[in-house]
């Protein structure tokens, strides 16, 4: 047999490892700032770029796409070469991938802080960046597939299946959810509206969790856990069932983010069913990981790497048990919109993703630097700080979440809301926010200790950029199935066909749920009195999106008495048909705004109240934790793209009169703005009608009012 | 888009989609399980040992780029 000598590329692994560490610390730091802002609102500094509404998307994007993203690439570039017994296909593509991804991260950070956002959670980046992501993702896929194709092993290990499924699914999700029509550089409107947009968004949102935070990490688990424990995975057979069941089930689960919304019932039911079924493959995977360590638990006591990996897999088990429970309608009715969900995702993010990443870094850095880890003791301290940090982070949020939900739902014996003032339910859980910030700080300190440990390790070692390897050349087998070769066995040596089947598996779920909702008219009953936004309201809506109001305020009243009492009539599908994008939100840090404009409802506020509240929320509600938006008071409304905005809406089928954008839109805008400015004048507030705040007030006063019109 | 959606709206009994999906899932699941259970022992061993094979040559570093 011919033995070939070749070299693994460790340089790209090192680059991605450094990027993971850097962006990890940045992402966690931004998260800590966001956590502190909820306790001390003045930490938003009355400055647009540092308000919670922009900081929070920066945190989520940094944690998911910068920290976890780079960690995925670090692990894939390292393990793929070794599992394929081949160097990466192209060093140039590797470098384009690396620098391209870092450029995207920097662009994302800047634009999010500047207020450029599509207003869709975890997909906030605007269209030029979305295109860049697509290109870089294709570069990654190309490099990966060429490497798999030139491999020296006969078959493809299960870790690589997970990488393949990740690549293809993220591509589909990203492209479909980012479909939008630009109205200018860095501003676009989602192709979908209202209920359809919500469904596409949460099909994407949930599968970002599935295929960005879970499947690539399962791939990493299937490589690094056996590697660190120095024993094969407990059951390879189980991993096969795990893989197919997981990718097939996950894709359906998205609608559990929209229970009790105006999404069609059958879609909600499907989402719940598949979410509950997900326990099986998830726990299959977790047990497969943990049982790999059977008979080796003494090693876990010694080795910080294994400690991190064990807690990571355990956290995965916890989160994937909790997820299906939260998707049961009765539990969801309580937990949705509360901090319970924030606690839940952090078990996943800090425990599963964070600890898996730390474990891999502690294992990998000494390997590629040909040395020992500088300090096991520091790694152990990191481990305990991290573990405590996770607990002190999550438990208070569970407590706070349940407390707040119960307060929202409590009635007096006379049948009135016990806590009609939303703020009461917020001040009640502030101590929990203190604890959460403390837990997050511990976790961050642990990560900083890791940075020190890694720097010391790197200094002590000598880096092997190109690692020499010898392996026999692959025996060339005919592409066709061989005699006696099972179909799946054949598939395991055909990456492209494998990808095609993975694609089929994930497309079925997406198509069955999304397509009928988009195409069947009866799924979205229209309401005649629902009319398009006026030009001023449309402008106000764009300000609402820009400031990230949806981060803290939902626009979706569920059909519960506790909600209709507090907010007004429950939301109907037909009310959102002109909402490109939808703004239903997912967390009520502040009250729901779906009916804020309805004069007869409890939460209605006059124009002057909104004006003062935006300028200085604490002057209106002293205990409020909302940041101030003084720039809305002084900024002039920019109407340069108004014509284009109207045109794009018309292109979507929003029934503005023909040619409306040319002149009439601006005239109508000014008439409405003058009216609001006069209103404010009567309330004792001197301002001019060309300010951004006027548009925002117009939008808020419109919300939820259409169904009351005759 | 309207052109496409117009025809797709005409699909009769689109409500049966969810049931079809369940059947497809069950078949995929059963097939995968069946395949996994009847997998040959030597294949399983070969596959599960893949991560553990190290052929690195005494960790020597030869810089290709210079």
Image: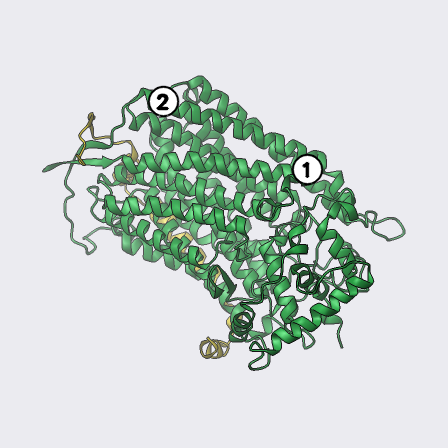
Chain colours: A green, B yellow
| Residue at the farthest right position | A414
Q: Chain of mark 1?
A: A
- When asked about the image quadrant of residue A356, the answer is top left
Expressed as whole percent of the image width and height from the top left, the position of residue A217 reads 42, 40
Mark 1 / mark 2, whichever is N-terminal: 1
Numbered disc in front, either 1 or 2: 1
Q: What residue is at 30 percent from the left and 22 percent from the top?
A: A461
Q: What residue is at 48 percent from the left and 77 percent from the top?
A: B2
- Badge 2: few (under 14), some or many (20 or more) residues near its Cα, within 10 Å? many
Question: To which residue does mark 2 refer?
Answer: A457
Residue A15 visible in the picture: yes
| Residue at the farthest left position | A2
- When asked about the image quadrant of residue B53, the answer is top left
Q: Chain of mark 2?
A: A
Left/right of residue B44 with respect to residue A623 in the rendered view: left
Point out the image quarter for the C terminus of chain B.
top left
Expressed as whole percent of the image width and height from the top left, the position of residue A31 reads 56, 39
Q: Nearer the viewer, residue A359 or A42?
A: A42
Marks 1/2: CA–CA distance: 38 Å
The total of numbered circles placed on residues is 2
Q: Answer whether labels 1 and 2 touch (C-beta < 8 Å).
A: no
Callout 1 secondary element: loop
Q: Nearer the viewer, residue A79 or A56?
A: A56
Question: To which residue does mark 1 refer?
Answer: A40
Q: Are the residues under badges 1 and 2 in a single subunit?
A: yes
Callout 2 secondary element: helix
> Is the residue A571 above or below the residue A588 in the image?
below
Q: Which mark is residue A139?
A: none
Residue A238 visible in the picture: no
Q: Nearer the viewer, residue B55 or B44?
A: B55
């Amino acid at each position: 047999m011919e033995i070939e000598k070749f070299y693994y590329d460790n340089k790209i692994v090192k680059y991605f490892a450094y990027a993971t560490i850097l962006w990890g610390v940045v992402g966690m730091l931004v998260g800590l700032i966001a956590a502190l802002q909820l306790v001390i609102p003045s930490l938003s500094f009355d400055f647009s770029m540092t308000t919670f509404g922009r900081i929070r998307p920066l945190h989520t994007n940094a944690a998911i796409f910068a920290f976890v993203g780079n960690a995925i690439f670090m692990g894939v570039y390292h393990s793929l070469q070794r599992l394929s017994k081949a160097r990466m296909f192209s060093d140039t593509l590797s470098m384009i991938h690396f620098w391209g991804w870092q450029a995207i991260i920097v662009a994302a950070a800047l634009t999010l802080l500047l207020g450029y956002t599509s207003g869709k959670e975890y997909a906030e980046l605007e269209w030029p960046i979305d295109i860049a992501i697509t290109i870089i993702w294709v570069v990654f896929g190309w490099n990966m597939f060429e490497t798999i194709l030139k491999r020296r092993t006969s078959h493809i290990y299960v870790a690589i299946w997970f990488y393949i499924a990740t690549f293809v699914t993220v591509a589909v999700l990203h492209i479909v959810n980012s479909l939008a029509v630009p109205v200018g550089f860095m501003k676009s409107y989602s192709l979908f509206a209202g209920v359809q947009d919500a469904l596409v968004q949460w099909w994407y949102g949930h599968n970002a969790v599935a295929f960005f935070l879970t499947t690539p990490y399962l791939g990493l688990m299937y490589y690094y856990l056996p590697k660190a424990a120095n024993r094969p995975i407990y059951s390879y057979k189980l991993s096969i069932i795990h893989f197919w069941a997981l990718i097939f089930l996950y894709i359906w689960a998205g609608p559990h983010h929209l229970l009790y919304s105006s999404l069609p019932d059958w879609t909600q039911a499907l989402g719940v069913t598949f979410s509950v079924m997900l326990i099986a493959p998830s726990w299959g995977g977790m047990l497969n990981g943990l049982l790999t360590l059977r008979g080796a638990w003494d090693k876990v006591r010694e080795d910080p790497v294994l400690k991190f990996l064990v807690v990571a897999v355990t956290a995965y088990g916890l989160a994937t048990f909790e997820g299906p429970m939260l998707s049961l309608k009765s539990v969801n009715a309580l937990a949705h919109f509360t901090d319970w969900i924030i606690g839940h995702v952090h078990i996943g993010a800090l425990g599963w993703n964070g600890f898996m990443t730390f474990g891999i870094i502690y294992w990998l850095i000494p390997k590629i630097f040909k040395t020992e880890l500088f300090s096991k003791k520091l790694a152990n301290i990191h481990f305990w700080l991290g573990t405590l940090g996770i607990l002190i982070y999550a438990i208070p949020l569970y407590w706070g979440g349940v407390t707040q939900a119960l307060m929202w739902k409590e009635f007096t014996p006379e049948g009135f809301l016990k806590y009609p003032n939303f703020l009461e339910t917020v001040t009640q859980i502030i101590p929990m926010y203190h604890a959460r910030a403390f837990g997050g700080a511990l976790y961050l300190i642990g990560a900083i200790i890791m940075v020190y440990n890694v720097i010391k390790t790197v200094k002590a070692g000598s880096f092997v950029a190109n690692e020499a390897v010898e392996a026999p050349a692959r025996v060339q087998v005919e592409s066709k199935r061989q005699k006696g070769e099972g179909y799946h066995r054949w598939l395991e040596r055909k990456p492209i066909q494998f990808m095609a089947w993975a694609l089929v598996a994930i497309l079925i779920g997406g198509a069955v749920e999304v397509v009928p909702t988009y195409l069947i008219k009866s799924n979205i009953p229209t309401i005649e009195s629902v009319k398009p936004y006026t030009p001023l309201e449309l402008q106000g809506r764009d300000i609402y999106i820009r400031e990230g109001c949806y981060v803290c305020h939902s626009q979706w009243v569920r059909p519960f008495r506790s909600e209709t009492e507090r907010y007004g009539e429950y939301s109907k599908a037909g009310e959102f048909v002109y909402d490109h994008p939808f703004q239903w939100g997912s967390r009520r840090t502040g009250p729901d705004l779906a009916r804020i404009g309805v004069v007869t409802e409890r939460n209605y506020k006059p124009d002057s109240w909104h004006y003062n509240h935006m300028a200085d929320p604490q002057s209106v509600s002293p205990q409020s934790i909302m940041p101030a938006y003084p720039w809305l008071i002084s900024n002039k409304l920019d109407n340069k793209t108004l014509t284009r905005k109207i045109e794009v809406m018309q292109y979507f089928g929003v029934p503005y009169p023909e040619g409306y954008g040319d002149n009439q839109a601006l005239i109508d805008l000014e008439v409405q703005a003058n009216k609001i400015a006069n209103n404010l004048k009567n309330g004792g507030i001197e301002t001019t009608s060309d300010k951004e705040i006027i548009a925002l007030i117009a939008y808020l006063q419109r919300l939820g009012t259409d169904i009351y019109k005759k | 888009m309207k052109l496409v959606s117009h025809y797709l709206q005409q699909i009769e009994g689109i409500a049966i989609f969810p049931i079809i999906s369940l059947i497809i899932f069950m078949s995929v699941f059963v097939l995968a399980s069946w395949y996994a259970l009847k997998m040959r022992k030597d294949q399983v061993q070969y596959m599960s040992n893949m991560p553990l094979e190290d052929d690195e040559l005494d960790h020597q570093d030869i810089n290709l780029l210079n």
